Image (cartoon, helix red, strand yellow):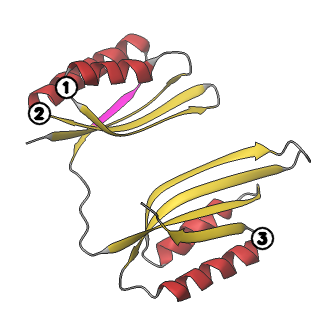
């Protein structure tokens, strides 16, 4: 039976921590089930979920703590279990591109939260267009909609919110 471990850390961009974590996991025969690594300004953020036999995970926890201490990087480690759901869901992808303005991400999160829709994954980034030098942002998310939901009504409410906020958005079922 596998044991599961979640890792989060923020390191200097050039510290090579992502490579070190992957190397340690590989040498201990642990699987990286999910991993997000991203440059965040001058920093590098890492979130990962690994699995392996309990003794390999225990060794990995010790090695990661030593790695963090050696490089002065706070490592957060937490044992976990795979996510289970009490009802059936349909995954939907949501994509938004709009002028970058404060509060938009909050409003989108609030919309789904008020409807008890799980946000399974969310990523955003801001950028400046090459043509007009306009500051835009992009939001991509996967939400889990209950099979009991009336999807056309939900989609209509979502599009109305996006129209109100002047957002270019789509919401469509995830394709395998």
**Residue 153 picture location, percent across and down:** 54, 88
Which residue: 63% across, 69% down? 170
84 relative to 47, above or below: below
> Mark 1 or mark 2, which has the lower sequence index?
1
Residue with the most extreme right position = 132
C-alpha gap between disc 1 and disc 2: 9 Å
Packing grade of label 2 (10 A; few <14, some 14-19, many >=20) is some
Locate residue 105 relative to residue 77 in the image: left or right.
Answer: right
Which residue: 32% across, 18% down? 23
The reply to whether dot 1 and dot 2 touch (C-beta < 8 Å) is: yes
Label 3 element class: loop
Residue 165 falls in image quadrant: bottom right
Label 1 element class: loop
Packing grade of label 1 (10 A; few <14, some 14-19, many >=20) is some
7 relative to 137, above or below: above
**Residue 26 picture location, percent across and down:** 26, 22
Which residue carries the number 1 mark?
29
> Mark 2 or mark 3, which has the lower sequence index?
2
Locate residue 59 relative to residue 47 in the image: left or right.
Answer: left
Which residue: 65% across, 46% down? 125
Which residue carries the number 3 mark?
166
Q: Main secondary structure of the magenta part?
A: strand
Which residue carries the number 2 mark?
53
Locate residue 14 relative to residue 46 in the image: left or right.
Answer: right
> Mark 3 or mark 1, which has the lower sequence index?
1
Packing grade of label 3 (10 A; few <14, some 14-19, many >=20) is few
C-alpha gap between disc 3 and disc 1: 49 Å
Q: Is residue 73 visible?
A: no
Along the line of sight, the residue nearer the viewer: 115 or 172: 172
Which residue: 46% across, 65% down? 174
Where, quadrant-wise, is the C terminus in this rendering?
Answer: bottom left
């Amino acid at each position: 039976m596998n044991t599961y471990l979640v890792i989060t850390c923020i390191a200097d961009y050039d510290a090579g921590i992502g490579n070190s974590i992957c190397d340690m996991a590989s040498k201990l025969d642990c699987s990286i089930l999910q991993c997000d690594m991203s440059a965040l300004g001058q920093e590098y953020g890492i979130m990962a979920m690994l699995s392996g036999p309990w003794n390999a995970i225990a060794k990995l926890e010790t090695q990661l703590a030593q790695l963090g201490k050696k490089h002065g990087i706070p490592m957060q480690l937490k044992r976990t279990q795979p996510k289970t759901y009490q009802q059936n869901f349909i995954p939907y992808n949501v994509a938004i591109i709009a002028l970058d303005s404060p509060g938009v991400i909050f409003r989108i999160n609030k919309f789904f939260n008020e409807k008890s829709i799980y946000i399974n994954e969310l990523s955003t980034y801001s950028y400046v267009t090459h043509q007009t030098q306009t500051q835009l942002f992009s939001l991509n998310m996967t939400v889990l909609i209950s099979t009991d939901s009336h999807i056309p009504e939900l989609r209509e409410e979502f599009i109305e919110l996006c129209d109100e906020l002047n957002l270019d958005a789509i919401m469509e079922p995830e394709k395998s």
